[in-house]
Image (tube, rainbow, N blue to C red):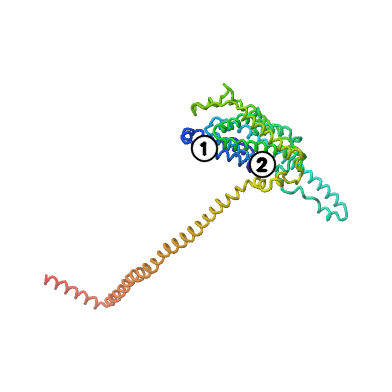
Amino acid sequence: MAGPTPVSALIHAATMVTAGVYLVTRSAPLYSSVHEAQNIVAMVGALTALFAATIAVGQYDIKKVLAYSTISQLGFMVAAVGMGAYVAGMFHLITHAFFKALLFLSAGSVILGMERGHHHAAHAHAHNDHKTKQKFKKGKHGHHQGEHHNDSHHDVFDPGDMRNMGGLRKTMPVTFWLYMIGTIALAGLPPFAGFWSKDEILLDASHHSQTVYWLLTIAAFFTAFYMGRQIWMVFFGEARHEAATHAEESPRVMTVPLMILAVLSVLGGALNLPFEGLHNLGHWLEHTLGEVEALGLNLQVAGISTVLAVLAILISWFIYGRNPLKAGQIDPLKKPLGPLFTGMENKWFVDEIYQAIILTPYTKISYFLADVIDWKFWHDFVHETVIAGTYNWISNIGLNENVDQKWIDGLANGLGTWTQSFSATLRKIQNGFVRSYALSVLLGVVLIVGYLILK
């Protein structure tokens, strides 16, 4: 989410959503053989759809609302493929790619418009501050008075915070209408693409499990509500920040791709309309999945979901549209819902729970393994004390003192001492007198002659 919106759009409209749903669909023979696994997958998907939808209600960042919306819509798809409604799941995957990419890229357009507005406001402040300083410098004590100008425009500004927006439909009309198309498609209102794919999932759920059906129906209600809340906070009311007042519409290089996605968000449902002869996606998937059941349009299921979506949008208007937020005003749901809204606002403390249950113990175990096991035990005790200590003891006491110094050095030193003694004895023969050498020759001759005679 911290990356550029095209990256967010790619991940949330295609990559992340495709992986699991496509995997389960391609593994259809395996899942179809184990109904218990199908029920688990469907229930996990339905609970995820509702859980993430409630989180989206309490978010203020324009991209985070859409991010948790993606998790919720992914729950719809997983529930569908878990129930064996592979065509419905893949159908919603395709239509969701259209309007969620449209919404994310439109959110990027809004953020860039806010950044341009903030840049414009900052330059205006800088220009006014410069004029004010020049004015005070002309006064007697101007250098003291000029230091107290207002620096509020230097505060950290978040262009993606919906609390800083408001009234953008006037300054960014093209983005507004494109965002509205994506919102209506996501909310599942006819005849937009999201209506056909979402209602096909709800219809399959009504046949498969009433629990899954009602969980998804409630999630669909929340979907329409949080998208209505976003529309009222971002585009209606008065600007709650100078950046929103000076926001600028995005150029055609950004809006034209959004228009293409908007057309797909409106007409994308034609891929698999629930009428005889128009179930095109289902017939195409039969080449991979085998024969699939083609469900028609159920007016009761479609009527309930549509009425709930309209009701959710009306409730969002009653809370956020009738009396638009003012600058610095807290969310209208915060007081009446109390801890419920706090939970939604803080994502039901999933991050904190994950930190406490997973990350903190993992960090402590990692520290214990690194510090105690690896360093103190393995390095200090095993390596330094046992291996290195034993080696040093054997080297110093056993080999150095006994073998090397006593035996090897003793033998070498003894050879040297014997050589010196023997040399001293031989040195006496070399006395330099001719008579001594003559006597030696005589004795040698006597020895040789005696050896010959005795032999």
Is residue 146 toward the left or the right of residue 8 in the image?
A: right
Q: Position of residue 418 (x, y in %)?
A: 30, 73
Label of residue 57 in the image: 2
Q: Earlier in the sequence, mark 1 or mark 2?
A: 1
* SS category of the residue bearing label 1: helix
Dot 1: few (<14), some (14–19), or many (≥20) neighbours within 10 Å?
Answer: some
Dot 2: few (<14), some (14–19), or many (≥20) neighbours within 10 Å?
Answer: many
Label 1 to label 2: alpha-carbon separation: 28 Å
Q: Position of residue 196 (x, y in %)?
A: 61, 29
Is residue 55 toward the left or the right of residue 285 in the image?
A: right
Q: Of residues 46 and 430, which is closer to you in this image?
A: 46
* SS category of the residue bearing label 2: helix
Q: Position of residue 201 (x, y in %)?
A: 58, 32
Which residue is rendered at x = 49% and y = 29% of the image?
289
Residue 277 in sight from this viewpoint: no
- Residue type of the residue flagged with mark 1: Asn
Relative to 63, does residue 264 appear above or below in the rendering?
above
Q: Dot 1 corresponds to which residue? A: 39
Q: Position of residue 406 (x, y in %)?
A: 34, 71
